[in-house]
Image (cartoon, helix red, strand yellow):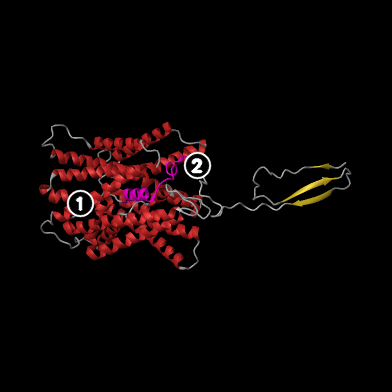
Amino acid sequence: MADLEEVDLGTKSRPDLSQEPSFSNFTRNSSTESAQVIPITISPPEKETITPTDWAGGELNPQDAWLPITESRKGSTYSAIYHILASGIGLQALLIPIAFSTFGWVYGAIFLSLAFSWQLYTLWLLVHLHESESGTRYSRYVHLAVTAFGPKLGKLLTIFPVMYLSGGMCVQLIIIGGGTIQLLIRTMCKDGATCNAKPLTGTECYLLFMCMAIVVAQCFPNLNSIARVSLIGTITAIVYCTMIWALSIGKGRPRDISYDPLPLESTIATYGGILNALGIIFLAFRGHNVILEIQGTLPSSPKHPSHKRMWSGVTMSYVLIAMCLFPLAIGGYWAYGNKEPFSNGAILKAISQFHGHNTSQYVLGLIYIIIVINCLTTYQIYGMVVFDNMEIWYTSRKKERCPRWLRIVIRLLFGGLTFFIAVAFPFLGSLSPLIGGFTSVPLTYAYPCFMWIAIKKPCLHGGMWCTNVALGCFGLFLSLLFVAAAAWNLAVNGLNANFFKP
């Protein structure tokens, strides 16, 4: 009787398509002189793909249901607007009048309009790259970059920029918020003339701001849950921008104002000043590193994809952003010309310098309070990206949701770390043009163009292909120029590295 050797075809598990598709079943005769080989050819099953008609809109990655960014996908167009405005308008916009003092009215308006249009186009690319036809949603910038460029190159290009623009932004918000608290105390107490209590030091102001930010962070488990916080951030951002440019125009221009660019010593200094001014304009737009995360809070289905709601939110948000930034730039330049102080919160400092004597301390105090509240709300959005990355590490290893007590510990540790960095490097804002040159600029203006080409694969040498290649390459070129100009500026003017002296 012949002995038959059974071949396990692995019907209970999905076949490994990387193996050879042919198997051999050997039937051996009891006779040792001959053996008969009967090949059995099995064609591999076709790879299962999910088409838009098959996908019902459910969660394809179960891990997303455990993480702060994607834990709740019940957002709306309005919640997206609140998040975009709260994360997109910041104190970096107060520096735009400085750029106008270099370019003048015409070129300043042209460059600001070009940067605004360019970053709005890359936002459109990111919004439409958020989900694939199969239903896969790329709710994190790094995830999309890895899909487009591959694991090694994608992580190399985006992990540090995304973490700096999230964690680093939280550090800068502590510096700005803590510094504004100190200004508020000095303004209301008239530098100690009306207050007997000892004023808070810079470190104490940083600590006070950080404690308030972490207390707020403990109250909201995911990004969608902070929609009301972002609404407060939206209102405060619009109010303080409007108050600042309206106050600057209403108080009139100081004497001996000039709109001529300040004379520079050499040609190199002139080109360096132009590039620094251009960098101020291009770095005034922020939020691209969280736009996919915000879209990840929206529901999606084949009939109602998330990009429709998201793009409506982006459009309405950037109408309001333009209504804040352009009057701030034009009104600030009209009011102060080339007398604008070159420092953080430039136009705000100009109001205090030129109109402090005839402006009510309560008006200035109200502006400072609004800025502090805005910084607290913005901290929640950028901090959520860091919390999400920390929980990804935990859930990937434990295969379970992060417990509540661990979330509390993560937020406390992150708050302590950002506070330490803010106290150790209170001059971090002075390095923003340098670091932003190789983090924010390519992430905002270049990478989305290349990711569109890699994922969508437009027709070679077609309109979309040429447009994205040109913009992507020019974005990388600008990034190198801004880094070089910022490094040159630091080499010439030096850096006030006041370590541990906020």
Q: CA distance from mark 1 to mark 2?
A: 44 Å
| In the foreground, 57 or 164 | 57
Please name whichever residue, 24 or 49, is drawn nearer the observer in this view of the structure. 49
Q: For residue 71, what is the image quadrant?
A: top left
In percent of the image, x 35 and y 54: which residue is there?
Answer: 437
Instruction: Return the disc, 1 or 2, that comes first in the chain's sequence.
Output: 2
Q: Which residue is mark 1?
A: 244
Question: Which amino acid does the dot numbered 1 rest on?
Answer: Ile
Q: Secondary structure at mark 1?
A: helix
Task: Place residue 446 in its image quadrant.
Answer: bottom left
Residue under label 2: 63
Residue at image point 40% right, 53% down: 310
Amino acid, disc 2 = Gln
- Of 376 and 440, the residue lying toward us: 376
Stretch in magenta: 66-88
Q: How packed is label 2: few (under 14 Cα within 10 Å), some, or many (20 or more)?
A: some
Classify the position of the C terminus by image quarter. Answer: top left
Q: Position of residue 287 (x, y in %)?
A: 35, 51
The disc placed on residue 406 is none
Whether residue 128 is visible, yes or no, is: yes
Local secondary structure at mark 2: helix
